[in-house]
Image: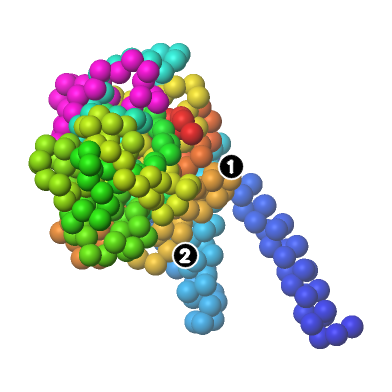
Amino acid sequence: MSDMESLRMQINEIDEQLVALFSSRMEVARRISEYKTEHHLPVLDAAREREVLNRVVSLAPEEMERYLRILYGTVFDLSRSYQSTLQGAQGSLSERLRQAAAATASKFPSSAVVACQGVEGAYSQLACDRLFPSASVMYFANFEGVFQAVEQGLCRYGLLPIENSSAGSVTAVYDLMERHRFSIVRGVRLQVEHCLAAPKGVTLSDVREIFSHEQAIHQCSRFLKEHATVSVIPFSNTAAAAQRVADSGRRDQAAICSRTGAQRYGLEILSEQIQDSDSNYTRFICIAKQPEIYSDARKISLMMAIPHKPGSLYRIMAKFAALELNLTKLESRPILGKNFEFRFYFDLDASVFSPEVLALLDELEATVDHFVFLGNYYELV
């Protein structure tokens, strides 16, 4: 037998002991959970965890200290998650979510008053048409106007772009999420196909200025590099850019917009499919003032401010992994007024109709300093 084989056999024997000891520890955690339930005690006992951690660190060589802290941090997280699952969802958040689900209609509505950013012909309107075949659309100049319209009850719903497969996250929307209270109730993915459009009779060689939204500009970067002598001017919205070009009376301007936007404002298409990727999709979220949780909800979005210290993000993600929840999106944004501290946004394939997920959400709300449940919803693809 080689030295390596001998060492591996030792590892196997140690692993067998670790599995047995871990199982024994979790069994004791189960009994502790029963005691806490009987005596109405919270799952988290931070003082006890610090006591245990200090004791086990003192038992090991100094060079093992950092590894033990990571190991026991994970053990504590798993133990708490196990106890929370055993106790069931009993917190205020899970109760609010149960009530919201019970109060939600059986089907998502086909008609509603919906707030969108931009003007007629915007991609937000096209996404709105996919969600609501009979929507009455109210247009606002910026994303904040959409949030405010929903908060103030002017519209039941608002539609906002959140992410593009080529250009990435719409950071302006993520930053506004912290400043407004809302619930995500639906999602939709829209295939985005950009064209270059100009007034009738204008040729590509005539164009000296191109207007469009910064996301569309980014998504068409390859086309724009091929026409580097043309000035590219960011605008509030692709359809608004088309409207501006149509109203300007100029013969040297064009807009990057949708085919619908070009047709709406009487522009001719100079070039089609100018986006960098043929597989160019934008995700939109539909928000409401109050939570609406439909029976087909399969995605959960969360917002958290996590302590700025090693292992904090890992411990949150370990909780998701323990329940085998698929993390589909992780976005970080700086917290204003705090140096290099970040707020995190998570998208998970999960549903509040799962008792284990409800228990996890209660645990997160109780243990994370700033935790916001953004919604549980179905995303139309």
Question: Can residue 51 be seen at all in this image of the molecule?
Answer: no
Kindly identify the residue that appears in the image at 14 percent across and 40 percent down.
244
The residue closer to the viewer here, 381 or 13, is 381
Counting from the top left corner in percent of width and height, residue 237 is at: 22, 41
Could you tell whether 369 is left or right of 360 in the image?
left
Q: Earlier in the sequence, mark 2 or mark 1?
A: 1
Give neighbour class at mark 1: few <14, some 14-19, many 20+ (Cα, 10 Å): few
Residue furthest to the front in view is 201
Could you tell whether 26 is left or right of 354 in the image?
right
Q: CA distance from mark 2 to mark 1?
A: 20 Å
Q: Which residue is mark 1?
A: 31
The correct choice, above or below, for 43 with respect to 289 in the image is below
SS state under label 2: helix
Counting from the top left corner in percent of width and height, residue 287 is at: 30, 30
The residue closer to the viewer here, 340 or 359, is 340
The correct choice, above or below, for 102 with respect to 13 in the image is above
User: Disc 2 residue type?
Assistant: Leu
Question: Can residue 129 be seen at all in this image of the molecule?
Answer: yes
Counting from the top left corner in percent of width and height, residue 134 is at: 33, 15
Q: Which residue is mark 2?
A: 53
Could you tell whether 214 is left or right of 152 in the image?
right
The correct choice, above or below, for 179 with respect to 228 in the image is above
Kindly identify the residue that appears in the image at 54 percent across and 57 percent down.
75
Q: How many marks?
A: 2
Give neighbour class at mark 2: few <14, some 14-19, many 20+ (Cα, 10 Å): some
137 is within the stretch colored magenta? yes
